[in-house]
Every structure is written in C-alpha cells, then in structure tokens.
Amino acid sequence: MDIATLIGIGAAFLLIIVSIAMGGSPLAFVNIPSLLITVGGGFAATIASYPLPEFLRGVKAIIKAIKPTIPNIQEHIDFLVEILTKVRKDGILSLETEIDSFYERDPFFGDMMRMLVDGIDIEEIKANADAALTKIEQELSTEVSVWESLGELFPAFGMIGTLIGLIQMLQNLNDPSALGPGMAVAMITTLYGAILANALSIPVSKKLKYYKDVELIVKESYLLTVDAIDKGTNPNIFRGTLNTLFGIKGGE
C-alpha cells in the first residue's frame, strides 16, 4: 500500500477543514447547488470526453494510487535472475511446470514464457509483446488522462458556478444586505473546484503517472528476460542489466 497517497490527500483535506473551522462556522462553506455545479459538472464533462468504459476504469484507477500493483523491485529482479539461472542449469523445458505461476504474476509475462517454451521464434515473441505493450500503455495513459481532465474541469466548473452566483447577486443590487452573502456563495464554487483539483485530482494523476512509468519498465524487464533466456545470457550480467533498467546502483 502507498501510504504516502493516503497521508498526502488526507492531510490536505484535513488542513483545509481545520482552517475553515478555526475561521468561523463550517456550515457557511456548505452549499449544495455549488457542489452540484462543481462536482457534477466536472464529472459530466469528463464522461463526455471519454467512452464510458474508459471513464469508469479511469475513475477506479484511484485504487492503484493507494494500492499499486507493481512488485517490489529488488524481489522482482531476484525472481527474474532465478529464472535465468534455472534455464541455464536445467534447460528451457524446466519452466513448463511454472507457466501457470508466471500467468498469476503477470499475464503479459505468462504469454511470452508460454511462447518461448513452445519454441516460438524470439522475433515473433517480441512482435507480440510490442503490440501488447502498446495496448497496455494506452490503457494506463487513459487512466492518468481521466484524472488530469478532472483536475482541469473541477476548477472550470467552479468558475462557472461563481459566474452564475455573481449574475444572480447582481440581480439583487437593490438589496445591499444581500450582496455580502451572495458574493460568499458565489465564491464557494471556485473554492470547491480548487480543492478538488489541487488536493485530489492532480495528486492522483501524478501518482498514477509515476506508477504507469514503473509498470512499463516492469513489462520491459519481462521482455528482456525472454530475450536473455533465448541468448543464454549470464545471470550475473543480466542482473546488472536489470539494475541499470530500474536505476539501482551497484551497492544498493
């Protein structure tokens, strides 16, 4: 679990709530029409920007920002090196009984290892892997993009709500006592938009972007493993290659 995501987002909202409570009545910052415009409008416009299944997958991706699916990198490297060592010692067919475990770890890896054990040419395996990687990258990019869109649209609809409130306020210029409360309500939608964008959507999109990059490197390491098995690469040399791929220095 990525505790930093929970701490960061939770602390941001908590600090905002505490600041509001210390400055006066928290209920003064609650306005249902403003919430409808900002939250509802932001989500509605984002839905219009993507096919519905892509939008829903993107929203659900917030779980990845809290509980990422990437493996522990050092354990991952050890796992791949052990596979290479086993093949050099017992031959490629020794992996036949482990194909199911490869699929459980990652279907992308399982597919490549299945083809390798079946004797498929390495160039064909790479071609299939590249096609699969393109699809995976597109899906991950869409998840990031959904949250980036929310980060842009929440403030935009907050501003729309503010303009609506100002127009309604200007219609009551003959009642000076209503101007102050009217202005306060008009500004609340901008506040909602800024909070939702900067305390939620933008941090989530950045965290998803980070994990997207790491996940693609993990996929690349699987492809390197298959290629190393095919070439009979020395496991120690391969470990150095993986360390370089993941940016791990020799002493770490």
Image (cartoon, grey):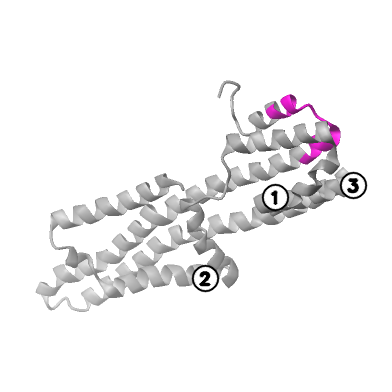
Crowd rating for badge 3 (residues with CA inside 10 Å; few <14, some 14–19, many 20+): few
- Upstream in sequence: badge 3 or badge 1: 1
Three-letter amino acid code at disc 1? Ser
Label 1 SS? helix
Three-letter amino acid code at disc 2? Ile
Residue matched to label 1: 101
Residue matched to label 3: 119
Q: CA distance from mark 3 to mark 1?
A: 19 Å
Residue matched to label 2: 47
Tell me, yes or no, if residue 51 can be seen here: no
Q: Are marks 3 and 1 in contact (CB under 8 Å)?
A: no
Label 2 SS? helix
Q: Position of residue 133 (x, y in %)?
A: 71, 51
**247 sits to left or right of 193:** right
**105 sits to left or right of 114:** left
Query: Quadrant location of residue 30?
Result: bottom left
- Upstream in sequence: badge 2 or badge 3: 2
Q: CA distance from mark 2 to mark 3?
A: 45 Å
**Residue at x 77% of width, y 35% of height:** 86
> Which is the main secondary structure of the residues drawn in magenta?
helix
Query: Quadrant location of residue 49?
Result: bottom right
Between disc 2 and disc 1, the foreground one is 1
Query: Which region of the structure is painted magenta?
Result: 226-239
> Split into 4 quadrants, where in the image is the C terminus?
top right
**Residue at x 39% of width, y 67% of height:** 157
